[in-house]
């Protein structure tokens, strides 16, 4: 089982420098960010698949949701629930 750190204070996010984040949403134990280019990055607790990576693996590192890129979808909005992540996309 992966250890996921829980932070009670703000922390810098390690994303590639050329990315600009335009939207962020936090669930109870996971976070999602949308870039200006419409890519979705998620991290945190993934027990219920809420990170969108096709598995239930947790991660402290922000990872791009590759399934959306492969389908040619651009994310416009993201909203995280306690154990879910909802997105609005453009095709």
Image (cartoon, grey):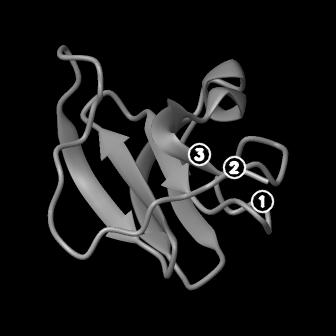
User: In the rendered image, which quarter contains the N terminus?
Assistant: bottom right
Return the residue at label 1: 49
Residue 19: image quadrant is: top left
Q: Earlier in the sequence, mark 3 or mark 1?
A: 1
Q: Looking at the image, is mark 2 or mark 3 nearer the viewer?
A: 3
Q: Secondary structure at mark 2?
A: loop
Q: Secondary structure at mark 3?
A: strand
Q: Looking at the rendered structure, which numbered label has been put on residue 34?
A: none
Residue 14, horizontal then vertical, whole percent: 27, 31
**Alpha carbon distance from label 2 to label 3:** 12 Å
Image position of 8 with respect to 40: above or below: below
Crowd tier of the residue under label 2, counting other residues whose Cα lies within 10 Å: few below 14, some 14–19, many 20 or above = many
Q: Looking at the image, is mark 3 or mark 1 nearer the viewer?
A: 3
Nearest the viewer among 88 and 86 is 86
* Pointers 3 and 1 in contact (C-beta within 8 Å): no
Residue 62, horizontal then vertical, whole percent: 45, 38
Q: Identify the residue shown where x is 29% and y is 28%.
A: 15
Nearest the viewer among 37 and 44 is 44
Crowd tier of the residue under label 3, counting other residues whose Cα lies within 10 Å: few below 14, some 14–19, many 20 or above = some
Q: Identify the residue shown where x is 57% and y is 85%.
A: 82
Residue 68, horizontal then vertical, whole percent: 64, 34
* Pointers 1 and 2 in contact (C-beta within 8 Å): yes
Return the residue at label 3: 59
Image side of residue 76 versus residue 56, left or right: left
Q: Earlier in the sequence, mark 2 or mark 3?
A: 2
Residue 10, horizontal then vertical, whole percent: 15, 63
Crowd tier of the residue under label 1, counting other residues whose Cα lies within 10 Å: few below 14, some 14–19, many 20 or above = some
Image position of 16 with respect to 90: above or below: above
Return the residue at label 2: 52
Q: Secondary structure at mark 1?
A: loop
User: In the rendered image, which quarter contains the C terminus?
Assistant: top right
């Amino acid at each position: 089982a992966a250890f996921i750190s829980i932070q009670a204070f703000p922390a810098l996010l390690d994303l590639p420098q050329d990315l600009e984040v335009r939207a962020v949403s936090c669930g109870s134990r996971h976070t999602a960010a949308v870039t200006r280019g419409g890519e979705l990055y998620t991290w945190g607790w993934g027990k219920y698949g809420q990170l969108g990576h096709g598995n239930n693996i947790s991660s402290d590192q922000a990872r791009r949701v590759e399934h959306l890129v492969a389908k040619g979808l651009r994310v416009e909005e993201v909203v995280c629930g306690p154990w879910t992540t909802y997105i609005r996309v453009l095709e």
